[in-house]
């Protein structure tokens, strides 16, 4: 079967365009309609909290039915339907319920799409970054486009723009084919629990959870933080874009990196640079050079860590448990880590201040590095 490169890439493009439209600006919108830092932190926690349950439910269904794309299409349809509710209310309780229900379906689709992409790639997982790069490009297009729009139009237009993008994701999912699954005998009879109980797998999930906990204050409050220093919406969008450009550059060279270094080396180096990034944001946000350098390190803090993580999951779980492995990564690391990070960021943002919050993120990242260093074993990246 020929690799459906452009169809896979188009889904990533529109999916991450939604993140580009929402990640820098959604919390500005919530502040615009009257919510405080604690409210925003709670709503973000609800959004990422569904990652604890939704990916696992849909992951089990996908591995049982071997029909990932049907599940993705249903989830994408309900995501756009439920998100449209934001167009009609500014009441906190209603927004909380819409956030919870929408994100349940929204957070379910990406892990299964990652699994479907890897099944299409078969024995060439190193080509993943060449497909995933279009998600980064979609993020950039949305960040710049929405930033330009919001510099001249009210923030009330943001939910409309995101609803339209969600519709494009749902439509794109209809043209992506299901990948054939040729289950490997190495993992076919290995129980899922026995895989998870391996020390290196446990360390991977614990480290990943801590890393996402450290990342979440950035996702929740970075734009609000920069607004405090009177940066324009366009410049804020530009800084988000710079981070994604750095990520794209890394993805372009990822195949060469993985041919030269083990996944463990790529992971540990990326985690170390992530700690530096949070310290730069904490202490040099009033200096544009500090923010520029910090955003360049997004190549490591997301690009390097994510690419290494996807390959490690592919190695740990094999094809038989791939859907569940991707789901566990989404639910444990992004779900639990995101909830904890959003909660502590919202709780302490106004009480102790951004400098302390981002400094804590750096310390949490150091702990994640130590766990990964001690327990994640050295395996060749080509596996």
Image (cartoon, rainbow, N blue to C red):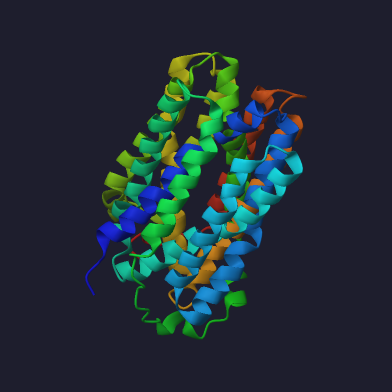
In this view, the residue in front, 18 or 250, is 18
- The picture places residue 3, in percent across and down from the top left corner, at 25, 66
Q: Residue at x 30, y 39 (%)?
A: 249
Image quadrant in which you'd find residue 223? top right
In this view, the residue in front, 103 or 161, is 161
Please, is residue 257 above or below residue 191 in the view?
Answer: above
Outermost residue toward the left in this view: 2
- The picture places residue 59, in percent across and down from the top left corner, at 54, 70
**Total residue callouts:** 0
Query: In which quadrant of the rendered image does the C terminus lie?
Result: bottom left
Please, is residue 382 above or below residue 366 in the view?
Answer: below
Q: Residue at x 50, y 40 (%)?
A: 160
- The picture places residue 258, in percent across and down from the top left corner, at 32, 53
Q: Residue at x 46, y 78 (%)?
A: 320
250 vs 165, left or right, is left
Image quadrant in which you'd find residue 10? bottom left
Q: Is residue 341 visible?
A: no
Q: Residue at x 26, y 50 (%)?
A: 256
Please, is residue 310 above or below residue 220 in the view?
Answer: below
In this view, the residue in front, 199 or 65, is 65
Q: Is residue 10 visible?
A: yes
118 vs 312, left or right, is left
- The picture places residue 302, in percent across and down from the top left corner, at 46, 43
40 vs 56, left or right, is right
Please, is residue 180 above or below residue 90 in the view?
Answer: below
Query: In which quadrant of the rendered image does the N terminus lie?
Result: bottom left
């Amino acid at each position: 079967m020929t690799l459906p490169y452009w169809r896979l890439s188009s889904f990533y493009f529109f999916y991450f365009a939604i993140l580009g439209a929402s990640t820098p600006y959604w919390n500005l919108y919530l502040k615009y309609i009257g919510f405080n830092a604690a409210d925003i932190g709670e709503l973000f926690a609800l959004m990422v909290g569904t990652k604890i349950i939704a990916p696992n439910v849909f992951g089990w269904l996908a591995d049982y039915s071997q029909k990932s794309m049907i599940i993705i299409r249903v989830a994408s349809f309900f995501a756009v339907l439920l998100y449209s509710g934001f167009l009609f209310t500014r009441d906190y309780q209603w927004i909380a319920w819409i956030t919870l229900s929408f994100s349940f379906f929204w957070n379910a689709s990406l892990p299964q799409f990652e699994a479907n992409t890897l099944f299409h790639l078969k024995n060439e997982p190193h080509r993943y970054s060449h497909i995933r790069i279009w998600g980064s490009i979609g993020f950039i297009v949305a960040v710049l486009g929405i930033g330009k729009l919001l510099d001249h139009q009210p923030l009330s237009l943001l939910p409309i723009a995101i609803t339209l993008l969600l519709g494009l994701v749902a439509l794109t999912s209809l043209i992506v084919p299901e990948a054939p699954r040729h289950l490997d005998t190495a993992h076919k009879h290995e129980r899922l629990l026995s895989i998870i109980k391996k020390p290196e797998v446990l360390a991977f999930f614990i480290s990943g959870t801590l890393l996402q906990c450290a990342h979440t204050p950035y996702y929740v409050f970075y734009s609000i933080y920069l607004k405090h220093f009177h940066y324009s919406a366009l410049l804020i969008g530009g800084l988000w874009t710079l981070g994604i450009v750095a990520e794209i550059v890394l993805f372009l060279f990822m195949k060469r990196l993985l041919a030269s270094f083990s996944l463990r080396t790529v992971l540990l180096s990326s985690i170390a640079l992530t700690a530096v990034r949070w310290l730069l944001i904490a202490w040099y946000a009033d200096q544009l050079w500090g923010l520029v350098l910090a955003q360049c390190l997004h190549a490591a803090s997301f690009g390097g860590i994510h690419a290494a993580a996807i390959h490690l999951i592919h190695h740990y779980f094999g094809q038989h448990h791939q859907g569940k492995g991707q789901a566990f990564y989404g639910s444990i690391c992004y779900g639990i880590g995101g909830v904890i990070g959003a909660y502590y960021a919202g709780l302490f943002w106004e009480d102790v201040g951004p400098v302390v919050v981002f400094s804590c993120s750096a310390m949490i990242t150091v702990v994640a590095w130590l766990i990964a260093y001690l327990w994640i074993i050295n395996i060749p990246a080509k596996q």
